[in-house]
Every structure is written in structure tokens, then in C-alpha cells.
Amino acid sequence: MREILDDIDRWRSDGKKVAVARVVKIEGSGPRDPGAAMAVNEDGEVAGSVSGGCVEGAVVSEALAIIGENAPGRMVTFGYSDDEAFAVGLTCGGIIRLYIEQLDW
């Protein structure tokens, strides 16, 4: 999480809305440990990683939806048996559970 704080501070200083995704649980094999974080600003800029690249595109889409809807945070799950997760490249065989929330919602 520390590696994304400078980007978050810069974006917020520029008046941009920001959402943060955090790995909260891994079942089986997963690319990143719980606590891994990624920030997305309203322009789609990204800092950090929650999966080493395999589901980041889908996480950006979820984060932008939360920002656009001014919605509360939500839990999202990606797993090997999930068709959508497979389509975005999660082939490690595990399940990743992420919590994505907008800062200052």
C-alpha cells in the first residue's frame, strides 16, 4: 500500500477522484498476497498491482464504475473457474477476493 500513497496524494491534490482496490483474501494459488493494493483515478491512471497484471484491466473497470456511480465500496471475486476471470487472464488456479472503494465516498 505504501508504494501507491505518493500517487494518491498527487491525484487528490489535483482534485481527482480515486478508488483503491485491496486483496483481502486468496484461496489456493494467487499472484499477490492479501494487503496488495492498487489505486485508480477517475482518468484511468493506475498505481500499484493486485494481481501482477492478470486481472488489473477488470479491476480498473470496476474502480471506474464505482467512481462514476459515486457508489460505496464492494467486494469482487476472480477465480479460475469464473468465466469472466478466465477471460481476463487469471490462470493461476486460485481465487482472489478484492475490496474496491472510492476514497472520500
Image (tube, rainbow, N blue to C red):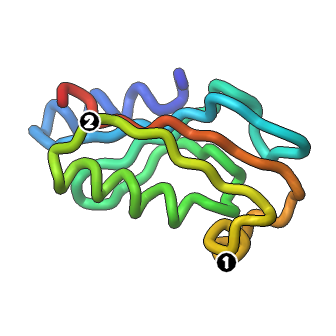
Q: In which quadrant of the rendered view does residue 19 lie?
A: top left
In this rendering, the answer to whether 56 lies above or below 97 is below
State left or right for residue 2 relative to residue 29.
left
**Quadrant that contains the C terminus:** top left
Mark 2: give few (<14), some (14-19) or many (20+) Cα within 10 Å: few
Q: Which residue is tagged 2?
A: 72
Q: Which quadrant is home to the N terminus?
A: top right
- 45 or 32: nearer the eye? 32
* Residue closest to the far top: 2
Task: Provide residue 74's location: percent of width, then percent of height.
Answer: 40, 39
Dot 1 falls on a residue whose secondary structure is helix
Q: Residue at x 26, y 36 (%)?
A: 72
Q: Nearer the viewer, residue 48 or 32?
A: 32
88 relative position to 72: left or right:
right
| Residue 71 in picture, x, y percent from top left | 22, 43
Residue 86: x and y in percent read 73, 72
Q: Residues within 10 Å of mark 1 (few under 14, many from 20)?
A: few
Name which residue type carries label 1. Ala
**Furthest residue to the bottom?**
87
Residue 47 x %, y %: 47, 45
- Between the residue at mark 1 and the residue at mark 2, the CA separation in whole angstroms equals 26 Å
Helix, strand or loop at label 2? It is loop
The residue that label 1 is drawn on is 87
Res. 18 mark: none
Residue at 49 percent across and 56 percent down: it is 59
The reply, left or right, for residue 43 in relation to residue 35 is left
Quadrant of residue 53 in the image?
Answer: bottom right
User: Which quadrant would residue 18 be assigned to in this image?
Assistant: top left
